[in-house]
């Protein structure tokens, strides 16, 4: 996204002004007002000013520079997996994960008229793909757009009754659109996990279940990943997520993002991380924070 449509730009200006009054309370997010990231801010930080940002880097920079006290960034989706680029941006930002939040993504068909008048619907390609069967059943042509909320704002700007948008109910409220269909996604488990970022780590109260997130790079030797992860099994540490990715076009050694249950101060976790460090090139802790929901 490079710019906001006129309808969204007016909202952005008002939200930026509100955030500037108390930057420490402001929470940055990526996307146009009404994006699911905006919804995450409202749910996780009710009553606090939300600061829209064009790119993930801008949301993180807002925290780095003090324009916002927190940033809420999507990291994975139950249907589409890892959110692109976030794993690269997290270590570069120098911020700490201090929380997590899950948003149940309920897509809505939005428009200015009635369902019978809509001939085409625009949205982010992922959102359109998640509603493919419903749109096809209605005979509505899907049209790709860079952002769900941006698509809704564009529909409001253009004023064409035959054009709809697939976006959140919040976007309908913000841009004065009608909700022509709610919960139109084909899968009923569509959920996005967000992480909450801050400049400094935050202590977690005793007795609260916690997660720890970290990155590491394996050595380019046989069984390197097996050896690196062995300590978690032997010390009874539950690893809830492990995902690999390649950096800078190199195929020589993978980098990994991982989530575990527990804190580095726990004996088992401490021993597991010590063994991990011995068998890897480097380990970078991203944060220890309260667990938002149990991992089944």
Image (cartoon, rainbow, N blue to C red):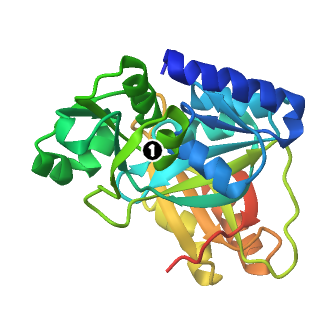
Residue drawn at 75 percent across, 63 percent down = 289
Which of the 4 quarters of the picture holds residue 8? top right
Q: Label 1 belongs to which residue?
A: 245
Q: Nearer the viewer, residue 165 or 225?
A: 165
Relative image position of residue 183 (x, y in whole percent): 35, 58
Residue at image location 51% in from the left, 64% down from the top: 241
In the picture, measured across the screen, residue 100 lies left or right of residue 162, that is right
Q: Is residue 295 above or below residue 158?
A: below
Residue 241, visible in the rendered structure:
yes
Residue at left offset 45%, top offset 46% = 168
- x and y, in percent, of residue 164 in the image: 29, 34
Indicate left or right for 10 with 67 as reference: left
Mark 1: which secondary structure? strand
In the depicted view, which residue is nearer to us: 36 or 264?
A: 36
Task: Note whether 248 is above or below 82 in the view shown.
Answer: above
Q: Is residue 64 visible?
A: no
Left or right of 92? Residue 158 is: left
Where 269 falls versus 278 (above or below)? below
- Quick one: label 1, few (<14), some, or many (20+) residues within 10 Å? few
Image: 255 above or below 23: below
Residue 79 in percent (x, y) is at 35, 56
Residue appearing at x 28%, y 51% in the figure: 130
């Amino acid at each position: 996204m490079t710019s906001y449509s006129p309808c969204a730009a007016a909202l952005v200006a008002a939200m930026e002004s509100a955030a500037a009054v108390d930057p420490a309370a402001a929470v940055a997010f990526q996307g146009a007002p009404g994006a699911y990231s905006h919804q995450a801010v409202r749910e996780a930080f009710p009553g606090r000013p939300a600061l829209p940002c064009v790119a993930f880097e801008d949301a993180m920079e807002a925290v780095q520079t003090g324009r916002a006290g927190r940033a809420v960034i999507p990291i994975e989706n139950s249907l589409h997996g890892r959110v692109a680029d976030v794993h690269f941006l997290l270590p570069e930002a120098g911020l700490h994960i201090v929380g997590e939040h899950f948003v149940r993504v309920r897509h809505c068909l939005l428009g200015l008229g009635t369902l019978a008048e809509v001939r085409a619907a625009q949205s982010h390609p992922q959102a359109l793909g998640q509603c493919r069967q419903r749109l096809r059943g209605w005979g509505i042509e899907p049209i790709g757009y860079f952002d769900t909320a941006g698509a809704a704002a564009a529909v409001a700007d253009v004023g064409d009754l035959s054009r709809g948008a697939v976006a959140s109910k919040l976007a309908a409220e913000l841009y004065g659109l009608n909700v022509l269909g709610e919960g139109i996604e084909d899968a009923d488990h569509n959920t996005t996990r967000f992480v909450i970022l801050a400049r400094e780590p935050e202590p977690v109260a005793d007795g609260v279940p916690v997660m720890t997130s970290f990155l590491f790079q394996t050595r380019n030797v046989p069984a390197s990943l097996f050896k690196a992860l062995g300590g978690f099994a032997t010390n009874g540490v539950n690893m809830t997520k492990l995902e690999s990715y390649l950096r800078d076009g190199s195929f020589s050694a993978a980098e990994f993002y991982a989530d575990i249950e527990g804190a580095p101060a726990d004996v088992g976790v401490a021993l597991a991380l010590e063994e991990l460090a011995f068998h890897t090139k480097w380990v970078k802790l991203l944060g220890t924070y309260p667990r938002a929901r149990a991992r089944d």
